[in-house]
Amino acid sequence: MLTVSEVAHRSGFAPSALRYYEAQGLIEATRTAGGQRRYARSVLRRLAFIRAASNVGLALEEVRAELARLPSGRTPTKSDWHRISVDWRSRLDEQVAALEALRDKLDSCIGCGCLSLKQCAISNPADKAADSEDAPGAAYLPRLLRRPTS
Amino acid sequence: MLTVSEVAHRSGFAPSALRYYEAQGLIEATRTAGGQRRYARSVLRRLAFIRAASNVGLALEEVRAELARLPSGRTPTKSDWHRISVDWRSRLDEQVAALEALRDKLDSCIGCGCLSLKQCAISNPADKAADSEDAPGAAYLPRLLRRPTS
DNA sequence: CTAGAACCTCAAGTTCGCTCGAGGTCTGAG
DNA sequence: CTCAGACCTCGAGCGAACTTGAGGTTCTAG
């Protein structure tokens, strides 16, 4: 059984983060007679998953959902992992595409030196899109950097 | 002179956001005798700039800095705009590269079905990097999605 | 046995970019 | 002149993901 500081060191998460994840139901720990946390070694894999997921841009809430879908107890099989990998891959692909689109818009703006409200795709706000609640496409990309298309 | 609701509608920002930006020193407004805001038309361009910048991932603080560097009063020249565009472009390039690296790591993980702490680049935390304060490279990419390299 | 490092809980604070609400004022078409 | 609707200020709140602090307990090497 691993102590908090061991897990913290080996996972790279701060102790406070471990407590937080536990409170959020992402990981669990047994307790000593005195009430201190002791972690099973498997928590390290779980934490690795959490880190990977958040690198991919998942919110903790979503991570929790994914963790819940992994058959609890057993190590994920290749196909579990494959399914997840495919999901994440497409999420990343979308983000890359969105960024590239934004970058290319930027390039087109260099030519015109614009930023004028109507002409410049990169800064054009909801003029056209706000009317039709479902935006036309990825004409301009609001806040994609912070949170994926969701 | 434009009213709050005109500017809000034409810029796509909520009135509360306009007040917030003013409080942050990003835009300014004159006042009527009765104390209501009236905006010069130039505020629209400024707001377009703000939106573009935040699409590119700049924090408001950084936007403020960039706005301050634009010669106040006159419309940015082509070279002003070019300088900014180059900066932003490289910022976006970095983000795209980071995401692609992450995606490719993900692909390599499909093969190994790992996520084990030591082996999997996508989830490997600070083990090696935390020791040398300056991380080795972009081996794994923490939180790049939320906030650029800063 | 003892000291001191590690741990505990719970509440509150942090950052970012705004939004909301209460309670009151201004503007301008009719 | 009236009155609906737009606007004002100021303080509080949100949501994400944690961190920090206070005040107290447990663990373990020596």
Image (cartoon, coloured by chain):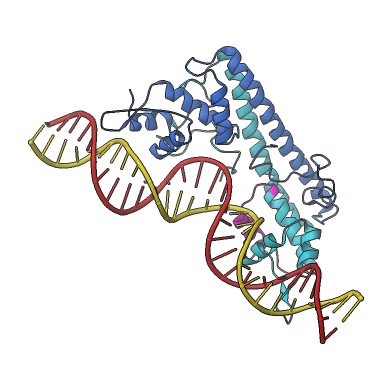
Chain colours: A blue, B cyan, C yellow, D red
**Residue A81, quarter of the rendered image:** top right
Q: Quadrant of residue B22?
A: bottom right
Of residues D13 and A105, the one drawn nearer to the viewer in this rendering: D13
User: Would residue A1 be found to the left or right of residue B97 on screen?
Assistant: left
Residue depicted at 61% across the width and 55% down the height: B62
Front-most of residues A137 and A95: A137
Residue B131 versus residue B19 in the image, above or below: above
Q: Position of residue A56 (x, y in %)?
A: 60, 31
Against A136, residue A115 (above or below) is below
Q: Position of residue A93 (x, y in %)?
A: 70, 29
Which of A22 and A143 lies nearest the eye of the viewer?
A: A22
Q: Is residue B90 visible?
A: yes
Q: Is residue A26 above or below residue A16?
A: above
Q: Nearer the viewer, residue A36 or B124?
A: A36
Residue at the (57%, 29%) spot, across then down: A65
Q: Is residue B1 visible?
A: no
Relative to residue A120, is residue C15 drawn left or right?
left
Q: Whole-percent x and y of residue D24?
A: 24, 46
User: Where's residue B95, x and y in %?
Assistant: 64, 38
| B61 drawn magenta | yes
Q: What secondary structure do most residues of the magenta stretch adopt? A: helix
Looking at the rendering, the stretch of residues picked out in magenta corresponds to: B55-72
Residue drawn at 61 percent across, 38 percent down: B145
Query: Is residue B108 shown left or right of residue C8?
Result: right
Asked whether residue B68 is drawn in magenta, I would say yes
Residue at 78% across / 65% down in the picture?
B5
Number of on-image labels: 0
Quadrant the N terminus of chain B occupies: bottom right
